[in-house]
Structures are given as structure tokens and as C-alpha cells.
Amino acid sequence: MAEPQHTLDCDLLIVGGGINGVGIARDAAGRGLSVVLCEKDDLAAHTSSASSKLIHGGLRYLEYYEFNLVRKALIEREVLLRAAPHIMWPLRFVMPHAAGLRPSWMIRAGLKLYDLLAKRELLPSSAAINLRCHPAGQPLKPEFRCGYIYSDGWVDDARLVVLNAMDAEEKGAIILTQTLCSKLQRQGERWQADLHKQGCGDVRVHARYVVNAAGPWTAQLLHAAVPKEGGGHLRLIKGSHIIVRRIFEHEHAYIFQHRDGRIVFAIPYEREFTLIGTTDLDYHGDPDQVAISEEEIRYLCQLASEYFVRPVEPADVVATYSGVRPLVEDGADAKAVTRDYRLEVDSDGPPLLSVFGGKITTYRKLAEDAVDQVVRALGKRQGAWTHDACLPGGDIFGAKPQNRSVLEFDSWVRTVQNQYAWLPSLLVARYARAYGTRLHTLLAQKTVLSEMGEEILPGLYAAEVEYLRRYEWARTAQDILWRRSKLGLHLPAYAAQRLQDWLLAHPVQCK
């Protein structure tokens, strides 16, 4: 590496811009630590934008006696719903009872335990339903006559990552995207990291503590920094999803059982679509090249077709995505590998904490546990704080998280639609869901549609693109159309190239 153009000194360097990395950055910055986070690609470019988009306890983990994990996740559901009601909301799940699979008594017992493991204020309890009378029974085959309904939550996973990064930056953290950590080594009482930021030169960071939150690359980074540790305890599991045109009109989701013991969700998605997934397969390839296989597409289509009256065919698939989950190696079958996390610290010199495993629902708790260890090692006294704090845009009815923000979100949307009546109401509703109260920043000093700037693509104005570049680290058409939004699903095939051309014609300075 040539002599770096910039040098940074900090308490904490975090490598990895997925949900765990940004969650730790937010928590640490809020406790007064000086924080630098680097991510080699975009925020949430990999695993953290490839989930099933659920905030859930993990009903199926009860079968594997993961009671502590399920309870921890169930508690977090409502904490997160209150913190960011614009990008998360309650969702009811219907499980049709399938003859020959899990017996009714087992499902009833599991749902009863699911209801009782954690206190609920926002989510209703489970119940048995008659699918011949319930709207969720209509799209199902007639042999599914009874079922069960229970509650969990939906989340825009990629936006959750961005909101945590925004909050971290607003509390003083330096967030460096498109920035590769090319070298990490101990130098006396500090770590020295050499970072390369695409198009912006090199940065050298001296840090008292390093957190390795590199997701699928965690073991690789650990081995490079601390060779004696070997490869760590990471197991890569690929999960893939398919997206088809909307199969059903109601707003419930489905959880389907399969004879192989797996479960698959069918979830209302982006108004016009149904999201179906996920698979669980061991993965040994390059995490940068992960993609769905034809076999996975057939598997998901066949399973959905066992339940829906209208068969789901591979030709119906309009989009797919795949991600690699970096899970704790516990020797179990792929579908049963624990989703709990493990934090491992190497203290032979300045400390390095590596994050293994975890699930999006428990990211805040993982971050809190990790930063507790960091502050103890650094001799700091600041305590945890994120349990009672809104994420950016989530302060719908006040600075503190509250049930009202979840229960009355739709009425708030109508209020802002009236406030910005000069914009199409559906566009304001999209802004409200994406940005929450930050839509006021996006629309500041604008009173007529012409002040939104060029309509680069249908429904995508220059003002929104500039907001995303300034506040949310968006740099490419992919960042904007698929992670900051899901507009890519709704726009024609030429949209990505047109937007990329516009971005190149309107360059921005390095951030």
C-alpha cells in the first residue's frame, strides 16, 4: 500500500457493513466511543438484504429446543417494531394443517409456547382457524380445511441496515462504504488497518479495538489478522427466494410445511408480488458470487404448488435473490443449524472481537452484548441505550419508541399525504414507509412538483436520488433500485441503465 492519503485514530474499528456491523457502530457511537466502520461494498450488499424480511421469534426453532434464542427474538420483535414503525409492521401468519406432517397437538403446543415465551403488547395471540371460512383459505387447495394463525413482523431488511448506519454517523461514527480492509495487524497497543476506498484513495486507521463483523468473510478476516486462530467456527448456509406475481389478495402471510422438515414462507410483497422462500443449503463457493440454482427454483415452486390452487411454475418467477448466512458451526443439518450468535475475543494484544452467527431479529441485542465487551476492555463506563431509542424516521409521535407509532402509523401517513397534497398520494405513502419522519428532510423547502427536479424514472425524482446519495451512501443504480428501495421490481428493464447514466452524469464527492 502506498502512503495513505488520510489517517484516522479511533477507539473502535468495525469491519463489515451488514446488520451486525452497523448495529455495533450505532450502539458504540451512542456510548461516546470514536468509531470507524468500513464495508467493501454497499451497506447490506450481501446477507443483510437477502433475508426473508421477517422480524420473528423463529417458530420452527422450538423443535430444536432453542428456547433461549426464540425467547430473545420474541422480546426483540416489539422493541424493533416501536423503534422503526415505518420499515417494520406486524404480520399475521397462516399455517395450513397438512395431513401426515406435524400433528395438530404439536402445532397447538408450539404456538401456545410461542405466545407465552415473551410479553406482547402489539401482537395478537395465536388461534385455530377454519380455512373454509377464512379469507386465507381461498387460494389454498380444498383439502386444507383447518389451520393456525399467529403473529410476527415484517421488516425492510436493507433499510434497517441503512437506518442503523445513519444513526451511527449522526452520533459521530465515520461510515466508509466501498472501502476494503486490505490489511489488519497489531502494532503495539493498537491495531493498524489499511483501507482502500474506491475512487477516493487510501486510509490508514489506528484503533484500540477491532470488531470483525464481516459476515461470510468473518473467518477469512480473522485468519488474516490472527493466523493462529485458524478458520473460526463459521458455517455458510445459502438461502434463496423467488418472487412471483401476487398469488392472493389478503394481507396475511403463509408458513408451509414440507415433508423434508423444512418450512417455506409465502409473503405479500411490494403490493403486486408474493415472496416465497427460503432454502437451506451448505455453501462452499465465493460469497460474492452466490446465486439461486434451477433446483432451488423448482423446489420452492413445487412446495408452493402443493398448497396453492394455482400452481407456481418456474416461468412465473419475475425475480430471485440469494444470500449466504454465516452461522455458528454446530454439526447440525443445514436446516437445523443454530441461528444464535457467538462473540469470540482474541486478547493477545489489542482486542479483536469476531461475530459468528446471528439473525436479523436479534441484531440489536447482539450489538449491545458486543459493545458491553468493548467498553469494559477500553475502561469506559457508558451503559446500553438502544432499547429505548428510535431509529431515524421512527419518531412518528415523539422521540421515544411507543406503541402508538405502530398502531396509528396509517393515520400518520394520511396526515403527511394532506401536508404534501401537491405530490401524488401514493408517492407520499412510499416516502412515509421508506423514510418515516425523514421525508420532511427529503421534501424540505419544496412546495410544488417541479421543485423535485427531473423525473429520472417513473416515480423517481432527482430530489430523492440526491437525498439517498447525501444521507444514505447510495452510489449506484443497484443501491437505489434494489436496496434503498424495491423500485427495480416495478420499473422496466432499461431503468437500471438509465439511472446509472444519470448518476455518472451527476457525480458526487467522496463520502
Image: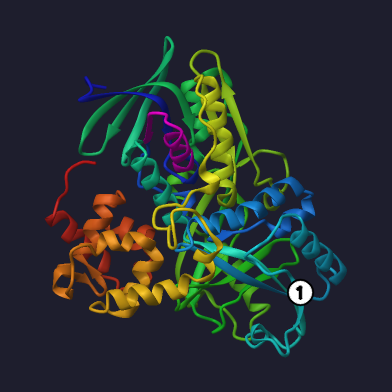
Residue 55 higher or lower than 209, as above or below: below
Residue toward you, 341 or 103: 341
Q: Position of residue 16 (x, y in %)?
A: 43, 38
Residue toward you, 282 or 249: 249
Which amino acid type is shown beneath numbered disc 1?
Ala
Task: Examine the rendering and report whether any part of residue 463 can be seen.
Answer: yes
As helix, strand or loop, the secondary structure at mark 1 comes to strand
Q: Position of residue 277 (x, y in %)?
A: 58, 64
Q: Is residue 127 magenta?
A: no
Task: Examine the rendering and report whether any part of residue 326 can be seen.
Answer: no
Q: For the magenta stretch, what is the residue range?
A: 22-37
Query: How would you rate the neighbour count of disc 1 (Cα within 10 Å): few for under 14, some for 14-19, many for 20 or more?
Result: some
Q: Residue furthest right?
A: 105
Residue 214 in the figure: left or right of residue 450? right
Q: Residue furthest front?
A: 398
Residue 198 in the figure: left or right of residue 252? left
Residue 221 higher or lower than 94, as above or below: above
Residue 180 higher or lower than 436, as above or below: above
Picture colour scheme: rainbow
Q: Position of residue 323 (x, y in %)?
A: 50, 52
Question: Considering the image in quadrants, where does the N terminus appear?
Answer: top left
Q: Which residue is mark 1?
A: 127
Residue pictured at 29% horizontal, 74% vertical? 419
Q: Quadrant of residue 100?
A: bottom right
Residue 499 higher or lower than 175, as above or below: below
Q: Position of residue 448 (x, y in %)?
A: 17, 74
Q: Is residue 34 magenta?
A: yes
Q: Quadrant of residue 370?
A: top right
Residue pictured at 48% horizontal, 53% vertical? 400
Q: Residue furthest top?
A: 188
